Image (cartoon, rainbow, N blue to C red):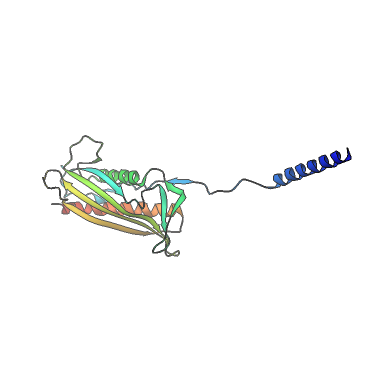
């Protein structure tokens, strides 16, 4: 009987000790909040409208290809010449391919440089087709004191009125925009500026098409 009492006493003591210890330990871990962003560029001002471009030109964005290195939603940071890392907690709201395509064609259409600028979902007949390859899309943090937003695109234009499959225009456009700090918000603001500048330059180059 005495042995039974002692055994139960120690069992109860052990249970209460474990219960007390578990109440002191928090199993809640503080993880960073996951955030989603979009590249957005402001509607172009009248100052970039190119009057020399034929008002009959209709351009269609055929496709935007983003390099597989940067095609995921997660932001990519370059830390050294060989080291890249992805950020699980900061990402694009939609795929970078969709985001860049929508903003690029919206800016072209709003510039009044063409009769119309649209994507392949439109039934409007086009005079020219555009293809875009995004080769670089990351935050360049190799120099922590000078973080930069990197965007590089090759843009090709095809004249649908010609039988040739060769582009009538092809050019690499590259921008590195200085960031205020190493935050995801600053990175996106830099991409906004980079895409805006590249699209403005592309519109200015339009008068060179043959």
**Residue 196 % position (x, y):** 31, 52
Q: Is residue 179 above or below residue 106?
A: below
Q: Is residue 138 above or below residue 117?
A: below
Looking at the image, the residue that sits furthest to the right is 2
Q: With 62 as the anchor, is 84 left or right in this view?
A: right
- Taking the image as drawn, is residue 9 in sight? yes
Q: Quadrant of residue 151?
A: bottom left
Q: Is residue 176 above or below residue 94?
A: below
Q: Is residue 13 above or below residue 181?
A: above
Q: Residue at x 61, y 45 (%)?
A: 28
**Residue 78 % position (x, y):** 41, 59
Q: Quadrant of residue 145?
A: bottom left
Q: Residue at x 15, y 43 (%)?
A: 160
**Residue 68 % position (x, y):** 34, 50
Looking at the image, the residue that sits furthest to the left is 163
Q: With 141 as the anchor, is 101 left or right in this view?
A: left
**Residue 115 % position (x, y):** 19, 41
- Taking the image as drawn, is residue 50 in sight? no
């Amino acid at each position: 009987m005495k042995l039974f009492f002692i055994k139960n006493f120690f069992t109860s003591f052990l249970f209460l000790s474990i219960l007390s210890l578990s109440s002191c330990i928090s199993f809640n871990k503080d993880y960073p909040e996951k955030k989603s962003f979009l590249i957005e560029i402001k509607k172009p001002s009248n100052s970039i409208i190119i009057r020399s471009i034929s008002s009959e030109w209709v351009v269609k964005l055929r496709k935007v290809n983003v390099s597989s290195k940067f095609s995921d939603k997660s932001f990519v940071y370059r830390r050294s010449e060989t080291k890249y890392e992805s950020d699980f907690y900061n990402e694009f709201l939609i795929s970078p391919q969709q985001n860049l395509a929508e903003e690029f064609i919206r800016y072209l259409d709003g510039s009044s440089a063409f009769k119309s600028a649209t994507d392949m979902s439109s039934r409007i007949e086009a005079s020219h087709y555009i293809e875009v390859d995004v080769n670089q899309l990351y935050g360049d943090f190799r120099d922590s004191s000078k973080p930069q937003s990197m965007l590089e695109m090759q843009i090709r234009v095809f004249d649908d009125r010609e039988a040739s499959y060769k582009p009538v225009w092809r050019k690499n456009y590259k921008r590195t925009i200085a960031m205020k700090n190493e935050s995801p918000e600053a990175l996106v603001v830099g991409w906004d500026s980079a895409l805006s500048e590249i699209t403005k330059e592309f519109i200015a180059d339009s008068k060179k098409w043959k």
